[in-house]
Every structure is written in C-alpha cells, then in structure tokens.
Image (cartoon, grey):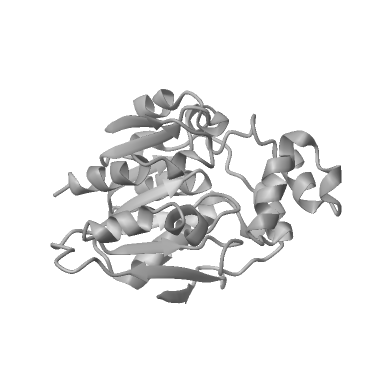
C-alpha cells in the first residue's frame, strides 16, 4: 500500500508498506528500505526479492521513494537535493510512522543517506548499507571518482542517448528504462554529499554489503573498519547485479533477525 507525507520543505514523499506474513512481527522493529540513485522502492527492493524475503520472515517493511525518484515529487532545482535532505526525509518518515525503533537498510545513494540517519537519529537500532565502500570514508559519500557529477549530469541531459560517452551509457540506459525524470536526477547528481562523514557516531550494529565487481563499492573493508560496530559480506556481482545474488536478501534478513 502506498502512502505519502509532506517533508520539511514542502516536497511530497511517497512510501510503501507491507505487512508481515501470518504469525510474523513478534514485536520486532519495522524494516525501512532506502533505494539507490535512479532506482526506486520497486526496482531496488521489490524486483530483487528483498521485500518478499523480509515479509516472509515475518517483518513489517516500509520502502521510501526518495525525492526525485519513484512516485515522490521531482523538483528540478539542485538546491532541493543531496543526501542531507534525504536524511531529513527519512526522519520525517519515522515521525509519520510513529516508530520508536527501526531497522534501516540503504543501498548506494540510500546507503549514504542511511549512514547520516543512523548517526543522528536515535530511532535507528540496526543498520545495513550496500553498494558503497571506501569512497564514503575518503570522500564523504558516493564515490565520485567513478561517477563524476559533471559527467553524470551531462549523460542524463543529453538529448540523444547516442551522444552519451560509453563510460556513462549504462547509467543513461538505466534512467531511461525506469522512466526516471532526467532533469531531477541531474539536479541530484549536482548535490551529491561531500566532506567528512560522521561514521564514528554510527554506533549501532551495522552490516556492509558489497559486490565483488562493484567499482562504487571498492575496498568495502575500509568502510567496515571505519564504523564502530560493523561486519562485511561480499557477493559476486557489480553495482546492479549484487542485489540480485541469491544470498543478498537472506543476508539482510539474517542480520536483522539477530537483533532479537
């Protein structure tokens, strides 16, 4: 079921809820899912089987469509974007849900957002971040050495996909396939977070997930080592395929179940 709320700056944020399978819940916190850049709740979490796995394991699940993505509002002003704003959207979602404790899962852009939320919002009791690695420690966010913002914006704004450099062709194809608002996505690419990440403040148990061939999650052990209480799991795959690995969704569910 899809719902919405108005965030701190007037943007409408859509989110999706799933009830647990019969006999589930057991008083465990809801699992909140935050997707990556260009994706949305459906492409990142439903199509990959993560939602189904969690629901089957008896969990309540909530997936947020980030601003500029999915069914949420899509302004074209870069000043309305960035993971800091998305972290504020997450806090607003938790206010709306009325949850005292949640388990938070983020991938790529959503992982950066989730780390910021876990550092600042005491309602996050357990954390899973995927699709990121040393770039979070060294740059403070998504690894722009692999995705330079100027190139990303140019690829998204090109009138003819044939004019997109080969390095960015996959990103443009992905945006077109999911029907993304390319102006909104380009605006976010200009607002990617930079600067020191408050990793020492992420004190909750954390699981880092990374594909072995994912350049955006290079050297993930660097990130795991920078967090006070983190472990690492790797899977064969790149940035888009690691989430479809048969062990990916169960790894999330197992880690969150360990909280009891």
Quarter of the figure with residue 111: top left
Please tell me which residue is depicted at 54% across the width and 42% down the height of the picture.
240
Viewed as shown, does residue 183 lie left or right of 215? Answer: right
Instruction: State whether residue 50 is above or below residue 61.
Output: above
- Residue 235 location (% of width, % of height): 40, 32
- Residue 243 location (% of width, % of height): 45, 43
Please tell me which residue is depicted at 79% across the width and 45% down the height of the picture.
154
- Residue 22 location (% of width, % of height): 18, 69
Please tell me which residue is depicted at 41% across the width and 44% down the height of the picture.
115
Whether residue 245 is visible: yes
Image quadrant occupied by the N terminus: bottom left
| Viewer-side residue, 120 vs 205 | 205
Please tell me which residue is depicted at 46% across the width and 75% down the height of the picture.
5
Instruction: State whether residue 218 is above or below residue 11.
Output: above
Viewed as shown, does residue 40 lie left or right of 258? Answer: right
Number of disc labels: 0
Whether residue 190 is visible: no
Instruction: State whether residue 97 is above or below residue 169.
Output: below
């Amino acid at each position: 079921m899809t719902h919405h709320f108005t965030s701190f700056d007037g943007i409408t944020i859509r989110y999706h809820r799933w009830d647990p399978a019969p006999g589930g819940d057991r008083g465990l916190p809801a699992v909140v899912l935050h997707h990556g850049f260009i994706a949305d709740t459906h492409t990142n979490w439903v199509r990959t089987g993560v939602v189904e796995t969690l629901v089957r394991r008896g969990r309540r699940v909530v997936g947020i469509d980030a601003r500029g993505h999915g069914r949420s509002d899509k302004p074209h002003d870069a000043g309305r974007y960035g993971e800091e704003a998305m972290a504020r959207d997450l806090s607003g979602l938790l206010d709306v849900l009325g949850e005292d404790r949640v388990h938070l899962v983020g991938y790529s852009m959503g992982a950066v957002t989730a780390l910021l939320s876990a550092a600042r919002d005491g309602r996050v009791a357990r954390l899973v971040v995927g699709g990121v690695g040393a770039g979070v420690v060294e740059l403070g966010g998504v690894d722009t050495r692999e995705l330079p913002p100027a190139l990303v914006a140019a690829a998204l704004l090109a009138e003819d996909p044939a004019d997109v450099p080969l390095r960015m062709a996959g990103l443009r194809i992905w945006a077109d396939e999911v029907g993304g608002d390319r102006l909104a996505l380009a605006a976010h690419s200009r607002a990617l977070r930079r600067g020191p990440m408050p990793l020492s403040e992420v004190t909750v148990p954390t699981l880092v997930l990374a594909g072995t061939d994912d350049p955006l999650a290079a050297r993930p052990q660097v990130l795991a080592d920078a967090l006070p209480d983190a472990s690492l799991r790797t899977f064969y795959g790149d940035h888009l395929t690691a989430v479809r690995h048969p062990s990916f969704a169960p790894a999330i569910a197992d880690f969150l179940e360990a909280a009891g």
